[in-house]
């Protein structure tokens, strides 16, 4: 007999699909855009990635929770996903570095989830039908009501979410090096901060919203970084483009990741579109068109730069996804900047693309007249 209660839970999709399973985490109802991640490990880093804010995270690897959780694996101050879905959930863990189980972790952060569902079937369903909203419930078990809730849930397209996950005031994170980078927090991951710090960059991190241009000018950074983040980049651009355009005018080096990549494209007049399914996982093949090498990358995005509307007089495509040929990297021609759609900081995932942080630092050194 199980030592853990097996309370019923339901996952209801907006197209009417309903599956039953067992409740995990916090007892309640939650909803959002249903997406999936193909990573074999790193569930804690995924759950705390701000780019996943407001989404239901379905893990395709069947065993989730078996190594527990630990503070050092958090990518943000709290869990960002709206809910968790998995095939087999482990209440017990075997890891001497862990301080609590995933069940305790989800309860502490009030995250509702469901286990015991056929995640392979659901992934195939989403790939065929496209991304859609869903609801998880362990309290309301009326299928018709839950399907209607999923239909009524706010669509990700048009949602501005970066302001929900950003810090409330500017913060300086010092390093031992001589370089200064103004970073903009649309949902910045801790490992991005770590990568820049370890390369000698002191960061002045600014909130997503707010009039900080005078402070930025006074601080006089050597370069600008635009972070990852959740939501529709077109909605975020309503307040974020002013600072991107200012950064371009300085002619100092710019680097953008994920949402930052999309904002840099939008600031150059290049549109961004919603994807049918999106890319999420740690095994996406990306080809570097400048070197001919293929990188295995970590990705998390549901929007992409519109390749059909690309203006080659403004940008050069530097990276493409080998699965669907979507744009993964750009080099800008009117200012010294580049951006990538994927996550070179990984966490979780392979480190094939960490050279991009070195590339950014080399640009800063060149701008300052320092030998690389």
Image (cartoon, rainbow, N blue to C red):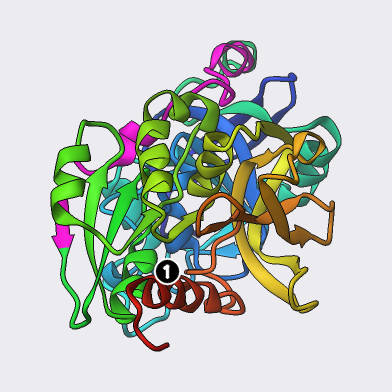
Is residue 136 at all visible to an observer of this figure? Answer: no
Which residue ends up furthest to the front in the rendered image? 369
Query: Quick one: 258 or 64, which is closer to the camera?
Result: 258
- Left or right side of 269 for 65: left
Crowding around mark 1 (Cα neighbors within 10 Å: few <14, some 14 to 19, many 20+) is some
- Left or right side of 313 for 333: left
Determine the residue positioned at 44% across, 29% down. Answer: 236
**Above-or-below relation of 295 to 118:** below
SS of the residue under disc 1? loop
Determine the residue positioned at 51% across, 39% down. Answer: 263
- Left or right side of 273 for 324: right
As for residue 154 lying within the magenta part, the answer is yes
Picture coordinates of residue 327, whole percent (x, y): 73, 51
Determine the residue positioned at 68% across, 55% down. Answer: 328
Q: The C terminus appears in which quarter of the rendering? A: bottom left
Picture coordinates of residue 231, whole percent (x, y): 49, 33
Residue range in magenta is 147-172
Query: Quick one: 159 or 31, which is closer to the camera?
Result: 159
Picture coordinates of residue 105, whole percent (x, y): 32, 56
- Name the residue beneath numbered marker 1: 92
Query: Quick one: 45 or 334, which is closer to the camera?
Result: 334
Which residue ends up furthest to the bottom in the rendered image? 371
**Above-or-below relation of 328 to 7:** below
């Amino acid at each position: 007999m199980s030592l853990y209660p097996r309370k019923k839970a339901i996952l209801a999709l907006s197209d009417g699909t309903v599956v039953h399973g067992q409740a995990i985490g916090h007892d309640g109802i939650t909803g959002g855009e249903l997406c999936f991640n193909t990573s074999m490990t790193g569930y804690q880093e995924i759950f705390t990635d701000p780019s996943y804010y407001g989404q239901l995270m379905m893990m395709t690897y069947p065993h989730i929770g078996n190594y527990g959780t630990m503070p050092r694996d958090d990518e943000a101050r709290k869990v960002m996903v709206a809910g968790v879905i998995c095939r087999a959930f482990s209440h017990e863990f075997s890891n001497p570095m862990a301080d609590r189980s995933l069940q305790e972790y989800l309860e502490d952060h009030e995250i509702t989830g469901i286990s015991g569902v056929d995640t392979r079937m659901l992934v195939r369903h989403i790939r065929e039908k496209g991304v859609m909203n869903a609801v998880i419930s362990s309290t309301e078990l009326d299928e018709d009501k839950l399907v209607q809730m999923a239909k009524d849930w706010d669509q990700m397209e048009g949602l501005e979410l970066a302001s929900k996950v950003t810090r409330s005031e500017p913060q300086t994170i010092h390093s031992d090096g001589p370089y200064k980078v103004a970073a903009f927090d649309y949902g910045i991951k801790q490992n991005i901060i770590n990568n820049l710090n370890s390369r000698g960059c002191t960061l002045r991190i600014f909130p997503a919203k707010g009039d900080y241009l005078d402070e930025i000018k006074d601080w006089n950074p050597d370069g600008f970084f635009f972070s990852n983040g959740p939501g529709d980049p077109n909605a975020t651009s309503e307040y974020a483009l002013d600072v991107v355009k200012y950064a371009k005018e300085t002619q100092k080096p710019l680097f953008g990741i994920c949402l930052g990549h999309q904002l840099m494209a939008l600031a150059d007049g290049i549109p961004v579109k919603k994807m049918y399914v999106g890319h999420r996982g740690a095994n996406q093949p990306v080809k570097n068109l400048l070197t001919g090498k293929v990188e295995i990358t970590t990705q998390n995005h549901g929007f992409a730069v519109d390749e059909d509307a690309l203006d080659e007089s403004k940008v050069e495509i530097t990276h493409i996804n080998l699965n669907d040929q979507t744009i993964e990297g750009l080099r800008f021609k009117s200012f010294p900047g580049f951006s990538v759609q994927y996550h070179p900081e990984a966490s979780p995932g392979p480190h094939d693309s960490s050279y991009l942080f070195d590339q950014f630092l080399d640009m800063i050194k060149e701008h300052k007249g320092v030998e690389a």
